[in-house]
Image (cartoon, grey):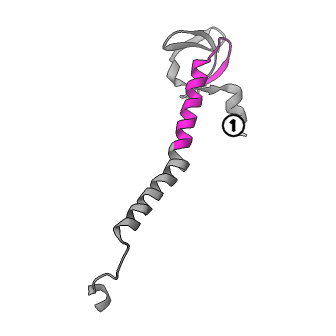
């Protein structure tokens, strides 16, 4: 019981605390933030270079072929004579890219 009531021993000074805080932020940046930003840039570049007749997958998991590209949306053919209009930002990856990433 006496141990709990005693004042804490000399701990880290404030400069050591700031160094640890900065080090934690740097580690978070290199392991979480930077890879996510890189992935977002790759997806944005992919969406910018979409082409007609390209096999793609939407964020909802719909596989289809690009039939028409407009400013903000894309017409996908998901089966013979079945076309859907999806937002360009919901296009996730090329079908071939997704298959190789899964393996």
Q: Secondary structure at mark 1?
A: helix
Where 94 falls versus 27 (above or below)? above
Crowd class of label 1 (few under 14; some 14 to 19; many from 20; radius 10 Å): few
Magenta span: helix, strand or loop, mainly?
A: helix
Residue that protrudes farthest toward the bottom in the picture: 2
Give residue 28's position: percent from left, percent from top.
Answer: 49, 51
- Residue 49 within the magenta-colored segment of the rendering: yes
Over which residues does the magenta segment extend?
A: 34-57
- Would residue 7 be visible to someone looking at this image? yes
- Would residue 1 be visible to someone looking at this image? no
Label total for image: 1
The residue sitting at 34% across, 67% down in the picture is: 14
The quadrant in which the N terminus is found is bottom left
Give residue 30's position: percent from left, percent from top.
Answer: 54, 48
Please state which of residues 13 and 101 is positioned toward the viewer in this rendering: 13
Please state which of residues 33 and 26 is positioned toward the viewer in this rendering: 26
- Residue 36 within the magenta-colored segment of the rendering: yes
Where 61 falls versus 25 (above or below)? above
Give residue 75's position: percent from left, percent from top.
Answer: 56, 11
The residue sitting at 59% across, 30% down in the picture is: 42
The residue sitting at 52% across, 19% down in the picture is: 88
Side (left or right) of 10 relative to 75: left
Give residue 38's position: percent from left, percent from top.
Answer: 57, 36
Residue receiving disc 1: 101
The quadrant in which the C terminus is found is top right
The residue sitting at 54% across, 28% down in the picture is: 59
């Amino acid at each position: 019981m006496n141990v709990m009531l005693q004042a804490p021993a000399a701990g880290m000074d404030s400069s050591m605390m700031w160094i640890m805080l900065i080090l934690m932020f740097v580690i978070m940046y290199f392991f979480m933030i930077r890879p996510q930003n890189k992935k977002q840039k790759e997806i944005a570049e992919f969406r910018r270079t979409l082409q007609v007749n390209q096999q793609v997958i939407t964020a909802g998991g719909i596989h289809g072929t690009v039939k028409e590209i407009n400013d903000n949306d894309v017409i996908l053919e998901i089966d013979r004579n079945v076309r859907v209009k999806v937002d360009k930002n919901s296009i996730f990856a090329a079908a071939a890219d997704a298959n190789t990433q899964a393996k």
